[in-house]
Every structure is written in structure tokens, then in C-alpha cells.
Image: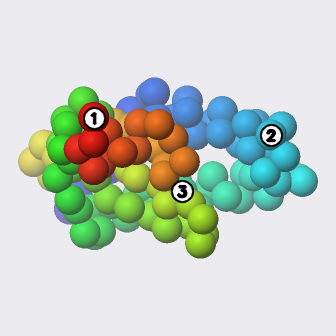
Amino acid sequence: MEKVIVLPDVEDMLLKLVSILFHEEYFSFRQSAKNYVDEIINFIYTVPTQRKKATHRNRYGNWYCAFKINKHTTWYISFNVEGDEYNITHITNNHTADYPRYIRGIK
């Protein structure tokens, strides 16, 4: 059975994301921001069953899968596979500068 391991940098980013989403007023309530991040976390643990694609640059990982959380935002979860372990190495979304470089191969 596959095992998902979320690296510490990704865990830290997800913890900070709740505060960012609340303070930047993407959500009016902290609990709503937490629920949003919980959806991302729940998806991360389904990565072994998702359709994976190779990244164009392996800076963040060799593989990624997409999670369309709403009509405006898709999260990209990067990972490496070692045996039956999926090491989650990075997470970004289509609103960040990193997205085109490592998903689409654009320089």
C-alpha cells in the first residue's frame, strides 16, 4: 500500500496558508480558511490514486497532480515516488509565478 509523506516545508506552508488566506481577506472567517486548507490536505493524501504528470523541471519534484479546488484556483502538488512512498515536495497554484516554470516548462 502506498504511503504519502508530506515534507516539513510543505507542512509549514500549509499551516501559514490559513493565516495568509484569512489576513489577505480571501475568507472572512479563520475557520473557512482552515476548511479550505483541510480540503487541500485531504487531496494530498489521495495523490497515489490521482493521475500524475511529469514536471518539466524537477526542481520541486519529478511528478505533479492537479487539484481544482474552485473555478478560479487549481493547486499543483509536486512529489517524488520512491518505491511505494510518495514524498510531497512542493505545492503551488495557478496564481503563483512558479506555476508556469515547472508545470508548463516556460522559462
Q: Label 1 is placed on what type of residue?
A: Lys
Give x and y (percent) for residue 103.
Answer: 29, 48
Q: Position of residue 1 (x, y in %)?
A: 20, 62
Q: Which residue is mark 1?
A: 107
The earlier-in-sequence mark between 2 and 1 is: 2
Circles 3 and 1, Cβ within 8 Å, touching? The answer is: no
Please state the horizontal and vertical placement of residue 26, each as a whole percent of the image: 78, 51
Q: Please determine whether, in this image, residue 75 is positioned above or below residue 82.
A: below
Count residues near mark 2 (Cα–Cα under 10 Å), then give few for <14, some for 14-19, many for 20+: few
Element type at mark 3: helix
Furthest residue in direction front, as rendered: 107
Residue situated in front as seen by the camera: 44 or 54: 54
Disc 3 or 1, which lies upstream in sequence? Answer: 3
Between 67 and 107, the residue placed more toward the observer is 107
Query: Label 3 vs label 1: CA separation?
Result: 27 Å
Residue 88 is at least partly visible in this image: no
Q: Name the disc covering residue 40, or none.
A: 3
In this rendering, which labeled residue sits more in front, label 3 or label 2? 2
- 3D distance between C-alphas at marks 3 and 2: 18 Å
